[in-house]
Amino acid sequence: MTSDLLARDRRVIWHPFTQAQTAPEPIAAVKAQGAVITDADGNEILDMISSWWVNLHGHAHPAIADAVAHQAHTLEQVIFATCTHAPAVDLAEGIAALLPEPLTRVFYSDNGSTAVEVAMKMAVQYAKNRGDARRTRFVAMEGAYHGDTVGAMSAGVSCGIFDVWGGMLFSVDTMPNAPTWDGDEAVDAKEAKALAALDAYLAEHGDAVAAAIVEPLVQGAGGMRMCRPAFLKAWTEKLKAAGALVIFDEVMTGFGRLGDLFACLKAQVTPDFVCLSKGITGGFLPMAATVTTEAVYAAFLSEDTAKAFLHGHSYTANPLGCAAGNASLKLLLSPACAQRRAEIEAFHRAALPGLAKLRGVNKPRICGTIAAVSIETGSGEKGLGAAVGLRLKEFFKAENMLIRPLGNVLYLLPPYCITDAQLTRAYDSMTRGVKGLFA
């Protein structure tokens, strides 16, 4: 029963991104199928955030489950520093075939933070290997979140949740962002101001920048802050013109979340690195990849071992994860999946304006399968600890809805298997939840 499992949980578990003293009791999940999680008491919870944005095709998809089971009976793990295997090569070929052509080299790791660390470390070593010792600076965008390891935190320090570890972080130069939303009349001016600030920075420091990192088109954990493709393209091209490498953190935006398969394709701009994780295995196993160009790879080739990229982890390119990734990629590339992603976006565009008319709701925004609004109750509270977010979490839990607001930002990021009836239920629940804030 749920009560017994929760009691045991309280004695031994420390949950991530959770203030245990104020958070609602966790859901005692026992099984899941599609967009529905079933708890220990038989309650069915609708998962509208793809279980932290990883379940592309829903829970327990049989095609991925069968691929993992088959692989487990064949080759479950092998040291990738010495060996290779078909699932890893197949997945790398599959990913590279979808990205802009210069992005051809795949380095596997274990999670999104590490994929970012890999790109940042490669960028620094790339400059050193080429004898360009000046390039040591990093540039990030205001409000960014790139993960929880030291380099990723340094790049995402402006999101405001890493203050306690400030003494551990290295310096990263933060540039203004130009977030926008439906009906934003000031967007042109904001973009011009942000690009002018970047121009001024590059005029002074451009020859010292090793790399710039950005969450392309949508900043996820920072509040589902969205920018226009033309702004991202201009931002990227200015940095590349200054000789900096550009890293796209597509940990959340990759694999169809924004409608197109990747944000770089949607924005029609090619970075030097793409960091991937979350949806890479369809939510089945932890895995990540950093994809870069042949030019970057070539700079590490030498008779000198010190010029190699000496980074890795025990489960690099785990065959089970690669098998899940290959099965997920096949589902992603099906015409049915592309059609459903378009249908989800169309549903958001029809339904979100109604939510945006409610008291306290503003800045409605949509990008592909993601829809978000900001909630203003008059308290001025923002950030992950905002009271409005905690109240809404309690409300949605009581309604058997897995919706996890980012402070005062309410968003949906459903799996691609979501039905229109389930989306309707989610929007109805959000409407009741928001109205309840002002009752």
Image (cartoon, helix red, strand yellow):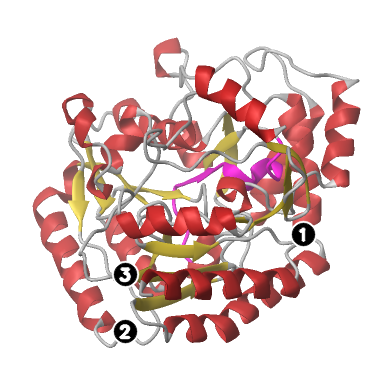
What residue type is disc 3 on?
Pro
The magenta stretch is: 268-284
**Quick one: 407 or 54, which is closer to the camera?**
407
- Whole-percent x, y for residue 193 in the image: 16, 73
Q: Which residue is mark 3?
A: 179
Mark closer to the observer (2, 1): 2
Question: Residue 151 in the image: x percent, y percent?
Answer: 32, 32
* Residue type, numbered disc 2: Asp
How packed mark 2 is, by other alpha carbons closer than 10 Å (few <14, some 14-19, many 20 or more), is few
Q: Is residue 236 left or right of residue 1?
A: left
Cα–Cα gap, marks 2 and 3: 9 Å
Q: Taking 216 as reference, is 385 above or below it?
A: above
Residue 232 sits above or below residue 351 on the image: above
- Give the quadrant of the C terminus: bottom left
Does residue 187 belong to the magenta stretch?
A: no
Identify the image quadrant of the N terminus.
top right
Label 1, secondary structure: give it.
loop
Q: Which of 196/188 is in front? A: 188
In the image, is residue 273 part of the stretch drawn in magenta?
yes
Q: For marks 1 and 3, give the one nearer the viewer.
A: 3
Of helix, strand and loop, which one carries label 3? loop
Find the distance from the CA under tag 1 to the CA under tag 3: 30 Å
Residue drawn at x 66%, y 75% is 424
| Tag 1 residue | 333
- Classify mark 2: helix, strand or loop: loop
* Residue position for label 2: 184
Q: Upstream in the sequence, badge 2 or badge 3?
A: 3
Q: Amino acid at mark 1?
A: Leu
